[in-house]
Amino acid sequence: MWVVTAWALGVALLAAAGLFWPAGPVDHVVARSWALAADDLPADPAAEQPMGEVLSAGYGHETVWVRLRVDPGLTRDRAGEALLLRIRPGYLDDIVVFDPLAGGAPIGPVGDRHPLAAQARPSTVFNLALAPGEQPREIRVRLRSQSTRLAHFEVLREHDLWRADAHSTVWGALYLAALTTLLVWGGAQLLVRRDALAVSFIALQAASLAYGACSLGFLHLFVAPGADVLWIDRLTSVMAITATGAGFAFNALLLREMQMPRWGRWLALGGLLLFPGLLVLQAVGHTVPALRLNMLLVLLGPVVFLLMALASPLGIAGQPVGDAPAARRLGLAYFWLSLLLTVVAALPGLGLVGGGRSSLYIIMLHGVVSGLLMLAMLTYRVYGLLQQRELLAAEAGYNRREVVREKAFRQDREKLLAMLAHELKTPLATVRMLLGTLGLAPQALRSAQAAVADMSGVIERCLQVGQLDDGALRVASQPCDLAELATRVVQAHPAHARMALAVPAAAPVCSDPQLLETVLRNLVDNAAKYSPPDSAVRLDLQAPSGGGVELTVRNTVGPAGRPDPDRVFTKYYRHAQARRWTGSGLGLYLVNGLVQTLGGRLRYVDEGPGVAFALWLPLAADRETVCG
């Protein structure tokens, strides 16, 4: 991975060095000036302003007139060799040259809107042969272009022109190779992790590659001299806007992973929605405002993205800043460098500052350097995500082991409880029989019998819970009367004197009478045990309606307090204040499980001064297939 990245970086740096480093040929232009004019007439010399090495006139519809002072005497030893005007970049629209030695006839036109036949020789840039003559003179260049008015003019001998063209072609090809490498490497990243960010990176590199091929003039080499090349001009403008939009999309998706603030999401969405509008504007012929707005977005976008990154709480791999400071630093470094490169690239293009030859290709450098930064971030991001995946896998393995260990522990505990329950049932039965032969006082006898009953109840619940958890509980459903079962349970309870029962004449249900009686007994025991001794326990059985019947057991809240509604049916749950009473925390868990097994529902209801448990069961007529 790092070998490919280093190769791409090396190719990109070589391409940049080749594009920016002087090619060696002697430029015969000794002075430059320029001015804007509203028509095809030459500009007033008084309105001209000195020009640096590169024309930087921004975007507009006006005609640009450039005056070049040419001195062929700089290469007197090569007198007689043809002089040619070389113009870059290769996506200017319309260029015409006026040489005083040409007898007033214009030379040209050349440009993206004209066939290539006027070119002195095939090239990725524009070149025009000047009139023969070795005396110093001034030539005028008329430039009209909607795509850009950032241009470089140089006058070279024919052999030097060949060398310069070969030089820029080779290094331009290396630049495109670097972009192709980034594109292929982005595809490899997509194979590692398929997500929107990797897809947007590939789209950005593909758009940058297409824009680079157009702007560097490589498409000219594959067009016949007399063919229409207007489509190259339009394609260049379209790809410039598309590449900017793809860059916006990549940055927006990256910031989404960093959890950019809400205002940032709205700004990013608004910015992305502008680009389809720019393409429509360009398609209907308003190329200049579309490209001007595109360049303004190129300039302002990184500022907004940097502010979003500073306000985002996570790093580039979606990691908290405190956990991954390197991810935070890498993300901020990317946005800072992107801002710096963009400002350097956009200001000359907008005509806000002048520039040297490097300003012609700084946008290319921006594309490849930002691509390398993006690739570095994607690589780091994939590394971070793989680390997170490994950590999650380790945690999952640990959790699985814990689940197995907990299951084994629970099974051992259930087996122990079952064994103790079976072993204690016989001794308890013996104790119950012997209590009547000891001659105890009536009150002591009742207390002893209640204690033995409580112990028997705990043992019975342990056995039933074990059967319920193991799925070994067998249900023998049959028609039965819930009102009759409730009356029998209340009458058999030791505290039946303080119980109030309100039931209809009959409440037929389809259920297992033994299990249903266990449910009712546990609910009544629970209400009597945890309510004040002098309070009433109410059982209200509604008349059958709506396909079922509901029995509600109500009691006043006693010293044990109210149960936690979220845990009341949890296994082994007991309120802290209820621990003074005998119990195992299995009663309501068992009751809820039995009710579900019987096809019913059990609800806990907080009624202010009291609590209630509402039991709903289906009518016998609704379960004929079972009770048949």
Image (spheres, helix red, strand yellow):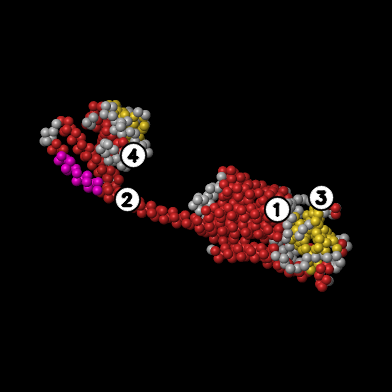
At label 3, the amino acid type is: Ala
Where are the magenta residues, as a range?
416-431
Q: Dot 2 surroundings within 10 Å: few (below 14), some, or many (20 or more)?
A: few
Mark pair 1, 2: CA separation: 68 Å
Choose between 160 and 591: the one closer to the eye. 160
| Rendered view: 321 above or below 585 | below
Closer to the N terminus: mark 2 or mark 4? 2
| Helix, strand or loop for disc 4 | loop
Closer to the N terminus: mark 3 or mark 2? 3
Closer to the N terminus: mark 4 or mark 3? 3
Q: Name the residue under label 3.
A: 38
Q: Mark 2 points at which residue?
A: 407
| Helix, strand or loop for disc 1 | helix
Q: Is residue 14 left or right of residue 563?
A: right
Mark pair 4, 1: CA separation: 70 Å
Residue 355, image x and y in percent? Answer: 73, 57
Q: Which residue lies furthest to the right in this view?
A: 103
Residue 70, image x and y in percent? Answer: 83, 63
Q: Residue at x 66, y 49 (%)?
A: 300
* Image marks 3 and 2: residues in contact by CB distance under 8 Å: no
At label 4, the amino acid type is: Phe
At label 1, the amino acid type is: Leu
Mark pair 2, 4: CA separation: 20 Å
At label 2, the amino acid type is: Lys
Name the front one of labels 4 and 1. Answer: 1
Q: Residue at x 59, y 55 (%)?
A: 334
Q: Mark 1 points at which residue?
A: 347
* Image marks 4 and 1: residues in contact by CB distance under 8 Å: no
Q: Residue 103, can we see it?
A: yes
Task: Name the disc covering residue 569, or none.
Answer: 4
